[in-house]
Image (tube, helix red, strand yellow):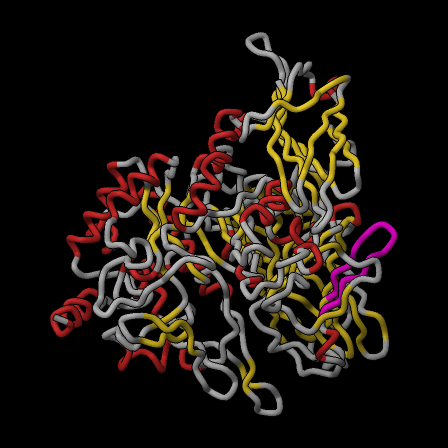
Amino acid sequence: MWIMVAAFLTMFFAASVPASASEPAKLIAPWTPVTVKSDATSVEVGVWGRSHKLANAALPASIVTADAEILASPVRLVGQVSGRPIEWKRGGNFVFRADESHAVISGWQSGDDLIVNTTTRIEFDGLVRVDLVLLPQYKMTPKLERLWLEVPIQRSRASLFHYFPGRWGSARNSGELPATGMVLPFKPLVWLGCEDSGLAWFAESDEAWRPQAADRAVEVLPQDQEVLLRLRLIESEVRLPVTFTFGFQATPVKPWPKDFHEWRIWHVPQLGVGSTLPVPKEWWLCHRAFPDRKPLPTLDRAAALGVKTAVFHEDWTPIQNYPMTTPESEFRQIVGACHERGMKVLVYHGYELSPLAPEWAELSDEVLVKNSQGQVTPGWYRHPEQRDFKVCYNSVWADRLADGIEQAQKRYGFDGLYLDGTIEPWGCCNERHGCGYRAADGSLRPTYPIFGVRRLIERLYGMVHRWGGIISAHQSTCCATPTLAFAHDYWDGEQFASGELSGDPLKNLPLDAFRAEFMGRNFGVPCEFLAYERPPQWTYDHALAFSMLHDVRVRPCGLAALEKMSPIWDAMTRFEVGEAEWHPYWEASPLATSQPESVKVSLYARPDTQAERGRALLVVSNLSADQPATAEVTLDFARMRAEPKAARDALSGETLTLAGGRLTVPLKPLRMRLVRVD
């Protein structure tokens, strides 16, 4: 049987890279067409929710996002040449090409010693790619001693940070910006922002960089009115010309979907402590989803609990990350059964290549991620017996995979994709497909294929958009907006799978880190939280205590977790939270204040109308790991434009005390309650 499958799969993936791979991206909803305005001194490029202005210089002078300017002053190049500070005297730009999906701007600036030429490409999702060439003026050979790229961001818009890559088991790459700032080695992505917006800077490589100290290539420096992101490009003499490629992306990257609460995503596999994942003696399709081999009763129960989106993990196909399954009819029946019950189906694809893939012998050496010693990275072990290896989507495998997914959707009828690590631009040194570079000492160093991964995810997004489905991206420590922009939502938190959140989760995942990485509103992409239960120290109830404060649900895995989440989904649907105003606990003037200190409150408010009385749905959380609390919540009814008369637990129905604008809510340690006031 496997010989027949291998023969079919070889034909299935025989197509070479399609011509469309090099064609310009096409505009996709929900983004709006790119607009361009230009005159003798400036060019302004608008995309959904943001604008970018270049004026008399090669780099952005203004970036507007969330209805306000985010730059404190223009992006600039500063440094020293021949013992003197660099002085730029002239500059300009013009529109080289533009259509509804992108604009290309040619720019320059110069002084007595140096010239800068730039090609700036601005995509419809707000990605700004800058190819910058620094060259000598006339026939001179100036002594360039220092060159820094500086990005000044308004202090009020840069309270949080996130960078990639982070470290497993930790949230240290996300959080509140320290008052003393940060000093980092080269990072391919640094985001600075606040709870509703921000600005990402990124670069695939530090190949042309010459910082004096490798561990201080990037600085983030808080000052009185600004936070300065400084990239130390050159701090020793170099031969000109020299080229740098980097980019920016203001966030949020797209409109916030009002209906995301209604996607009701259920991860079908029985994951988590206390559940069994038997490895069958012989192959059986989706055994992690249906270990009892009775899919229909399981799907019936899921439908009764309100599931609208079902995610099937990697065992929907016998070969890891390969868009073909057998027996075909069996999986088509599972997809059909989900559709009959009103559920859309997402299928797993990830970040690996399996030795069971027929292309392994031909392509593995060319497409796998390699480290600086030329070694490949082993990944997941699974049944049927295989050990899979990390693949790089800067290689031909990106288009081979996308072609296969497109054909598989026609065969099986699924609606969307669950992408496991696929959006992450893993560091790679495989020179056979263009990754990695040789340093001056001959050593091989990694590059981070942001643009290659982006091309794949953008193509997949366009495909899934046509199918009417969604892309749910699973990643950990990596909110890289150039790729995250093309996910409908993301699932974050597996970096804590070893139990780092057991006991007192806020020690390893402080609230500011949650707001920076795990909330999604700052990026424009909804997030769900991943909780690996370790009862009794760490459960879904504990995770909900802080995730719900951020309008983030814990994604249920398996039926037991679904029983926990279903009432929460229902309570939010009954309140119609998608039509409500969301007021989080960190607002400068909150609508709800609380005592004691361990208690925080976020709420959804629906003001008075002619048709109905105003009401609110509160998330009241006790964040103490070991002490119960009786929360005293004071509500500002005047600002809520409501006059509620009663309060009750939205899950249990228990009546709670509401008198004179003050609500009393008893809470267990590290627990939340949904409270409805009408």
On screen, residue 489 versus residue 83, left or right, reads left
- Residue sitting at 28 percent across and 36 percent down? 341
Q: Quadrant of residue 594?
A: top right
Q: Is residue 330 magenta?
A: no
Q: Is residue 588 visible?
A: yes
User: Of 510 and 152, which appears nearest the observer?
Assistant: 510
On screen, residue 413 versus residue 531, left or right, reads left
Q: Quadrant of the N terminus?
A: bottom left
Q: Is residue 105 above or below residue 631?
A: below
Q: Is residue 229 magenta?
A: yes
Magenta span: chief secondary structure: strand
Residue 31 placement (x, y as % from top left)? 48, 41
Q: Is residue 424 above or below residue 579?
A: below
On screen, residue 358 versus residue 61, left or right, reads left
Q: Quadrant of residue 618?
A: top right
- Residue sitting at 78 percent across and 79 percent down? 145
- Residue sitting at 15 percent across and 53 percent down? 329
Q: Is residue 459 visible?
A: no
Residue 335 placement (x, y as % from top left)? 25, 46
Q: Quadrant of the C terminus?
A: top right
User: Of 319 and 59, which appears nearest the observer?
Assistant: 319
Magenta residues, as a range?
218-230
The residue sitting at the right extreme is: 224
Residue 136 placement (x, y as % from top left)? 69, 75
- Residue sitting at 55 percent across and 51 percent down? 539
User: Of 17 and 8, which appears nearest the observer?
Assistant: 8
Q: Is residue 434 above or below residue 499?
A: below
Residue 491 placement (x, y as % from top left)? 50, 52
